[in-house]
Amino acid sequence: MRVLGKFTLPIVAWGVTGCSDVFPNQFTEHFTATNTMQSVSSTPEMPRNGIDLLVRDDAEPECRQLADLHFRLLGTSRFRWAELKSWRSDALAQAREIGAEVVVVSRRPVGTVTNTIRIQYPDNRTELQKVLNPHPRTMLGTPLYDQPGGLTSYQANTVQVMEYSAYFWLRPSQK
């Protein structure tokens, strides 16, 4: 991991788009509760009308409007991460976990990260570690120790980095 200010940025080993989905839910990992979170039940009930997911380019105006309507902010998640395929379901999962009824999410690209990956194609004299090989007809591995022979190549891979912000709200109580 590389730390950039208050954000963490993954250095993905294989760097394939979508591989970041094997990491834990980043909305949960980076969740910060507001002070009013203490009055929320530790075993939240399912929201009365389901969970509303609002996706906005800029979440601030929507959050101001919800605050004006007396919605209660339960907490926020803010982080930079490789583009997540499951960001919608991850945000909703965090909302279910804390009992939020409205989630306002914004996401925007902030740059890219390029990683170089070393790939060794060994010859018959090289002992191999077992390596997960997505292409069964190719010989892919990492030598246990350096020996002459084989072929080493380096592959550059670029990953899109996104900035995610999510605000978790509770509707005003009905009287």
Image (cartoon, rainbow, N blue to C red):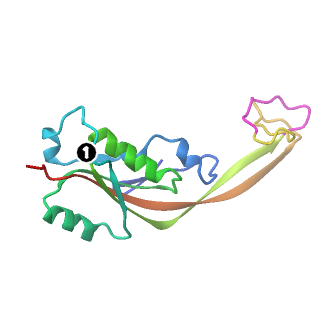
Q: Residue 147 appears at what percent x and percent y? A: 83, 35
Seen in the image, is 161 located left or right of residue 46? right
Given residues 150 and 141, the one toward you in this image is: 141
Badge 1: residue crowd in 10 Å (few <14, some 14–19, many ≥20): few
What's under tag 1, amino acid-wise? Arg
Q: Residue 53 appears at what percent x and percent y? A: 36, 56
> In the rendered view, would you say 119 is above or below 55?
above
Seen in the image, is 174 located left or right of residue 130? left
Seen in the image, is 56 located left or right of residue 118? left
Q: Residue 146 appears at what percent x and percent y? A: 79, 36
The answer, for residue 158, to whether it is visible in the render is yes
> In the rendered view, would you say 94 is above or below 131?
below
Q: Which residue is drawn at 15% across and 63% down?
A: 69
Q: Residue at x 25, y 45 (%)?
A: 48
> In the rendered view, would you say 116 is above or below 60?
above
Extreme residue toward the left, this view: 175
The answer, for residue 9, to whether it is visible in the render is no
Residue underneath mark 1: 48
Q: Is mark 1 on a helix, strand or loop?
A: loop
Q: Residue 55 appears at what percent x and percent y? A: 38, 63
Q: Which residue is drawn at 79% across and 30% down?
A: 128
Q: Main secondary structure of the magenta part?
A: loop
Magenta stretch in the rendered image:
122-133
Given residues 106 and 154, the one toward you in this image is: 106
Image quadrant of residue 58? bottom left
Image quadrant of residue 45? top left
Taking the magenta stretch, the answer to whether it contains residue 160 is no
